[in-house]
Amino acid sequence: MNEKISILLVEDDHVDIMTIKRAFKDIKITNPVNVCENGLEALDFLRDQQKHLPGIILLDLNMPKMNGIEFLQEIKDDEQLKLIPVVVLTTSKEEQDKVESFKLGVAGYMIKPVDYMQFVEIIRTIHLYWTLSEIPVED
Amino acid sequence: MKKTKYPRIQTRLFIGLLIIILFSSIVNILYYRDIKELNKVTNDIIEHPFTVSKGVRDIKIYINAMHRSMKDVVLSKNKIELNNSINLVNNNEQLIYDNFEIVKERFLGDLRFVNEAYTTFFDWKPIRDEVIDLVKNGNVDDAARITKGKGNDHIILLFQKTRKMIDFANEKAASYNQDSINILRKAKRNFLLTLIGSLILGIILFLWIFFSISNPINNMIKRIKNVSGDKMKGFLKNAGNQFAVLDYAISEFENREKILKEKVNTRTYELEETKNLLDRSIENAAIGMVTMNLKGKLIKANNSFCDFVGYTREEVLNMKFNDFTKEEDKAKGSEFVKKIIEGEIKGGSLEKAYMHKSGDIIYGSVSTSLVKDINDKPDSLFGQIKDITKQKQYEIKIEEHKIELENKIKKRTIELDKKALKLEKSQQALTFLLEDVNDIKKQLEISNRKHLEVNKELEAFSYSVSHDLKAPLRAISQLSYWLSQDYAEKIDKEGQKQLKLLVARVKRMDNLIDGILQYSRAGKLREKEKLFNLHFIVEDTINLINPPENIKVIIENQLPEYIGDPTRLGQLFQNLIDNAIKFMDKPEGLIKIGCRKDSNFWEFYVSDNGPGIEEKYFDRIFQIFQRLISRDKQEGTGVGLSLVKRVVQIYGGNIWLKSKPGEGTSFYFTLPIIK
């Protein structure tokens, strides 16, 4: 069931997008992936896609226009969007960013490692999470 | 005290006795009267009804007997019988006669009845004699005829005559009987009345005497109870009777009186002692003391006063207080005394000039107070006079000196003014100097603030730089990794090796950036401070490091509790232990951790038996990114020790080391004890 759902990746770094997509491929995740380069774009995308909302959002924090925290604040006020689990995927080890994110109800907070193999492990963990965890599904 | 007037107990008893005597006398008199009356009635009964009734009854009987004897006389057969019958007749006649005598003497009724009966009886004699003569002469038939005829008639007459007499006697007896019954009844009633009367009187008397004795006693006991309080409580309940209580109370009061008397004696003695002491004190006091009456005449004066005015005591006691006063001050003195007597002022002191007997003027400070009698009326005045003559003389001298001094001061003041002017100038110079200092201080503050801001900016800068550096670094790392993976066949061995090196260098750079991040974070203000046990933290750190089996890490003594950020201080130990492990060159490594307490700081140490550090590098090792061994030989960021130093400095401590190359290194650092 979870295989059909789509993944929304909010990320501005192209190498990171490549890394994540490659990691998906390596661990054979076939779900459709949508990419938005910043929060604003992601918000537009979500509001446009009313009917086919993604099953999970992977969110970077450092982004132009609208950063990850601002994006989280936006979707928190939206009755529908706030149901989508969000996993933060960032370089920031700042305590403030962690606290802020969890206050805004994120499902996970991951640091992007430099080493690719470690990156793959992280994605595997996220995958494990969304395969095992029940996620609310739209009727 | 409530005073109830009660007659004395003897008086009461005497009155009671008198009442009883009076009452019994009345009763006796009443009884005597009744008994006397009864006696009289009884006498009467014996005198008359009894004797007379018996007499008249006997008369009747003997008349019958006599009549029968007369018949016997007529019927007698011989002489002897005749004589006997005659004797009988005579005897009965005699008895009738005797009884008539008694009746005649005592009869209370009409004596005519008796006399008539007696006369009739007397008239019988001739008839009797006639019959007896006829019988004697043998003329029995005549005698029998006379007896039956004349004799019988006469006897019947005699009975008739005596009847009236008998009736009267009986009637009289009956009436007397009734009288005696009445008297007896009356006596009974009187007796009953007196019995009730005496009973009531007796009860009243008893109550009167009872209450008049028991009330005062009970009142006394109540008062004793009040006076004695708790002491008597038990006794009052247990004592058999009131007298025991009274007895006890009296002995108690005797005791108390004894104690009181002793106390009074002691107090009197003490008072006398005190009085003597006071008298002596007054007499020998250094200042003059006098007592005078309200008119100002002196009553008492002590030695000092006499000495003061130069008069003898006899002279003094004949004078008035104003007699010593100097003419000008007399009005002032009188006014003062008057005010005290009238109560306008409570007392106080006054300075006066006096005249010594020798004519010298002397000065005294007099304090006067009013002495009141028991009724709070002014009684006398008590004055204390202090000789201030010398003082006055000094005052005059002082006044002279004062003038002299004032002149000197004036001179001096002028000099001082000049100096002050000079001082003012230098003060102004000082003010300018101070202003300059303040300006510098302000500038310093500004630069300090700027410095802080720069520091902050620097931190933010280093943070964001390291952060932003990471993204491309990651890209390089991942891209080169993919290159080595995706194009493995197209890149030869040398190329592969270079790519591997590239990844490794990128990893090193990542570590360096992490180091910078840590260092910059360490520079932030101290926050999240709390009390924690350093010993536990260090133990946890050792566990986290998980040292290899050939290296032992031991804590030599108990580490203290400390107030600070546990993570940061844990990091401090971690870096030191990490270094020791990393550079360990001996097969059996030993790392020792411990502390000691100084007066105001803790000193910690982490020592190892590793390679040691040459002294010339002691400063260098604490600088950031400085390393003693090439990175290619030993991976490391070069941040560890500089971070340690930073943390120690932030907490206000010092860090230093002792080392011998080849033998080992000991790092020491201090943390101040926060009170």
Image: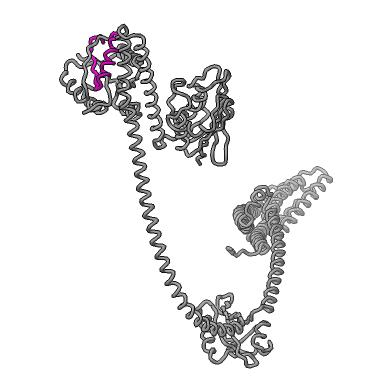
Q: Is residue A38 visible?
A: yes
Q: Residue at x 34, y 12 (%)?
A: B495
Q: Is residue B29 visible?
A: no
Against B584, residue B275 (above or below) is below
- Give the percent coordinates (x, y) of residue B416: 46, 75
Residue found at the far top of this picture: B489
Query: Is residue A116 toward the left or the right of residue B378 in the image?
Result: left
- Give the percent coordinates (x, y) of residue B408: 51, 81
Q: Nearer the viewer, residue B112 or A130?
A: A130
- Give the percent coordinates (x, y) of residue A43: 19, 23
Q: Nearer the viewer, residue B662 or B155?
A: B662
- Image quarter in which the C terminus of chain A is found: top left
Q: Nearer the viewer, residue B403 or B72?
A: B403
Q: Nearer the viewer, residue B605 or B354?
A: B605
Residue found at the far left of this picture: A48
Image mark count: 0
- Image quarter in which the N terminus of chain A is found: top left
Residue found at the far right of this picture: B80
The way the protein has been coloured in the rendering is one colour
Query: Is residue A46 toward the left or the right of residue B147 in the image?
Result: left
Q: Residue at x 55, y 92 (%)?
A: B327
Magenta segment boundaries in residue numbering: A1-28
- Give the percent coordinates (x, y) of residue B387: 62, 82
Q: Residue at x 68, y 87 (%)?
A: B313
> Would residue A111 be counted in the magenta stretch?
no
Query: Is residue B498 toward the left or the right of residue B547 in the image?
Result: left
Against A131, residue B552 (above or below) is below
